[in-house]
Amino acid sequence: MSVRIGVLNVQGAVSEHVEHVRLAGAEPVLVKHPDDLQGLSGMVLPGGESTTIGKLMRKYGLLDPVRELAQKGLPVFGTCAGMILLASRIEGHDEPHLGVMDVTVNRNSFGRQRDSFEADVAVSGLSDDQPFPSVFIRAPHIVEAGPDVEVLATYDGKIVAARQGGLLATAFHPELTPDTRLHRKFVELAEAYQMATARH
Amino acid sequence: MAQVGTERVKRGMAQMQKNGVIMDVINAEQAKLAEAAGAVAVMALERVPSDIRAAGGVARMADPTIVEQVMKAVSIPVMAKCRIGHIVEARILESMGVDYIDESEVLTPADDKFHVNKREYRVPFVCGARNLGEALRRISEGAAMLRTKGEPGTGNIVEAVKHIRLVQGQIRKVAAMSEDELVNEAKELGAPLELLLEVHRSGQLPVVNFAAGGVATPADAALMMELGADGVFVGSGIFKSANPEKFARAVVEATMNFQDYDLLVRLSKDLGEPMKGIELSTLKDNERMAERGW
């Protein structure tokens, strides 16, 4: 049976992630309310406007339960705004959102929309060595990563992909290209989590 | 190497806005209120559409000072409007670094035949459309996002409903056609065949489509989503209502939860007076903004 992966359905590139989760061989589940979190083996936080998504996650009572699940080991994959939601520290802001990943992020690090770009980026830990086609849209980057964080990719000297246990974060948008390698990597993390929790 | 201004980067920006509300603002204070209420972007203007109607005369690109003040005030994306076909206003807005340009029928058109060739810009464009042919013509000129036009500045949803229903109905029709009918359909619609083939195969528009032009209540915003919009533009509705802050928050939540009717009950309560609105039959033909654009 394929693993169930939640896709946060508040705002942003939700349908694109749903499609990629399906292509990666897992069953996507839309998550808007705390009830939707039942029986998930992983969760995706899509790109969108982090301020808007963070605000509405609080309002719908999603922030605390998702944080608890992530702290207990539920794999979570955050792209762009999703990476900001995961971070423990956001430059220029007092309060993080989920705050579960030991990184400091800077928002809109690459400039305004006219500076948004695509580039091929070498990402480690994928199924092959081909560079990943990466779309950066008003993208953030990781300024500083804690000792338990594995840096998976840098671009222009900036950390743009990282992993800490089951937490996977990219500054770019793998859901906007046909490449599903990062989603497949995440599905492997979710499968490992499902195996581990089934044993208990 | 890094490539800027690609189709994927421009359309992708609009994909990040889906399920969101884009609000018209005329100063930094309103922009901050919109951001705090959960807007995914703001449209920086000198006047909202209902005031443009009231003022009359020629409506042009906003004073760059206003746009810059809004850009400084918020971290969400900032859009601004240029006149239809006004290549230079578009270049000025691009040069200022606005995140999205709206080539808009709300302003007085600068060109009565041609729209801006939007492929030549690094900054993405959103354009208005009343039907599938108009939508696909704008995409072929390089629009990275669409909005059904409605009738701006009226607070009357009827035209917005008409336009989104027409576009969605035409998409369903094209999707159901056999491929040998499409050349003739392209001729009928005045749309490029390649884009029509794309709609035929995918059953949807190749870019994100928001609804605009007449949203005056949270229920109006939810209606647009129900009819298939990817998100909503709210122009005069917010800051012409009795309680803009409460109204803005209610519209954001209604858009994201458009089928949660218990929530919509709560969101619709005690909002105070919405904008007064205009009955469409009282508008003269030359007062209809949606007719602008070709």
Image (spheres, coloured by chain):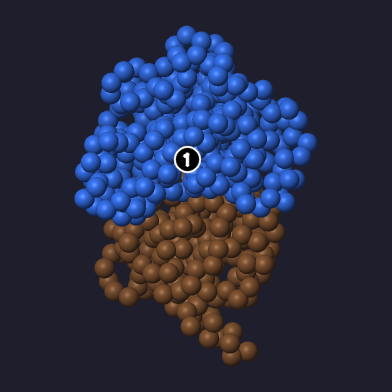
Chain colours: A brown, B blue
Q: Is residue A182 above or below residue B16?
A: below
Q: Which residue is drawn at 31% across and 18% down?
A: B111
At mark 1, the secondary structure is: helix
Q: Is residue A23 left or right of residue A3?
A: left
- Residue B285 x/y as whole percent: 46, 15
Q: Residue at x 57, y 13 (%)?
A: B54
Q: Which residue is drawn at 60% across and 21% down?
A: B278
Host chain of mark 1: B
Q: Which residue is drawn at 35% across and 73% down?
A: A126
- Residue B196 x/y as whole percent: 28, 45
Closer to the camera, B56 or B14? B56
Q: Can residue B92 be seen in this view?
A: no
Closer to the camera, B117 or A132? B117
Q: Which amino acid does label 1 sit on?
A: Arg
How would you rate the neighbour count of disc 1 (Cα within 10 Å): few for under 14, some for 14-19, many for 20 or more? some
Q: Mark 1 points at which residue?
A: B165
- Residue A95 x/y as whole percent: 65, 52
